Amino acid sequence: MSILPLSRRERLDVLRAEVRALAPETHADVERIPFGIDVMDRRLAGGGIVSGALHEMTGATQSVADDAAATLFAAGIAARAGGGIVLWVMSKPDLFAPALSQAGIPPSRLIQVEARRDEDALAVIEDGLRHGGLSAVVGEVSRVGLTATRRLQLAAEEGRTTALLLRRWRKARQDPLADPSAAVTRWRIACAPSTPLPVQGVGRPRWDVALIRQRGGDPGSWLLEACDATGSLALPAEPRDRSTSAGRRSTRRIAA
């Protein structure tokens, strides 16, 4: 019986692992993180996002507001991913810890690492995922190739840890999600007008959340209220009296 060279055997092992990683949702024992919003969870294959897998998100534009919305969206998922420690790999030291706390990640659950180069960030993210003792790893990167995302997907599956990759905009009109990726889901987040209040003030922020790709399911989009202190999103509340609201709008139009 012939024996394959070690290098070739290693390549075959990597290929087998990549094939397993391409369809984690086929395993019945895969853990998932539901959003707790029926219309979203019914759209997601299996009723939630896969826990031990890679997921990508970005702001709909390169604006600071959309970037912050995508950051808090990732924070909300990480907050609900098991309740343990979250490793956050930053591209620059601008992470605002009080905002993360309001999205469900208090300082006691947060470890921050700064890695200015994408290569360094990807190495730290992969090590954190393979460690197996973290609830989630969030990483901020600008450019990452298909091979690198495959490595992260394999590491997330091996460590049974949720991997959330925040794709930062580098240039206008250069979509961070344009390149192919091994991520199980890919999301685009945009700010929307906040929840109206009956008095003067700013209501709960709203986001346009777009699931632009998921493995084993269809895309979707929803208007949602931003994360609360538990990391949970919510559907906007409907007006209690639609006829009254419509009548008031009609009166204003007539008066105008």
Image (cartoon, rainbow, N blue to C red):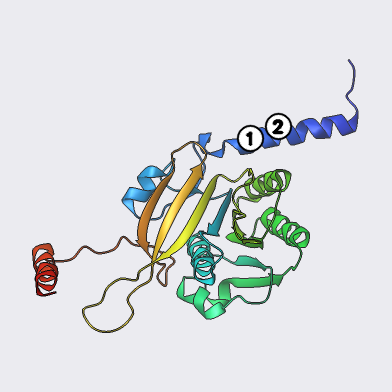
Count every numbered label the image shows and give the total. Answer: 2
Question: In x, y percent, where is residue 88?
Answer: 63, 67
Q: Identify the secondary structure beneath mark 1.
A: helix
State how far apart marks 2 and 1 are (Cα): 6 Å
Q: Compared with residue 150, is residue 122 higher up or lower down, i.e. above or below? A: below
Residue 87, quarter of the rendered image: bottom right
Closest to the observer, 64 or 45:
64
Closest to the observer, 106 or 55:
55
* Crowd band around label 2 with a 10 angstrom C-alpha radius: few (<14), some (14–19), many (20+): few
Seen at 40% across and 59% down, the residue is 208
Left or right, 137 with respect to 76, comes to right
Q: What residue type is labelled 1?
A: Arg
Q: Identify the secondary structure beneath mark 2.
A: helix
Q: Compared with residue 54, is residue 26 higher up or lower down, i.e. above or below? A: above
Q: Compared with residue 144, is residue 243 higher up or lower down, i.e. above or below? A: below
Q: Residue 16 carries which label?
A: 2
Left or right, 166 with respect to 42, comes to right
Closest to the observer, 140 or 251:
251
* Crowd band around label 1 with a 10 angstrom C-alpha radius: few (<14), some (14–19), many (20+): some
| Circles 2 and 1 in contact, beta carbons < 8 Å | yes
Question: In x, y percent, where is residue 144?
Answer: 70, 52
Left or right, 191 with respect to 126, comes to left
Seen at 42% across and 44% down, the residue is 44
Q: Which mark is residue 232?
A: none
Where does the C terminus fall, quadrant-wise? bottom left
Residue of label 1: 20
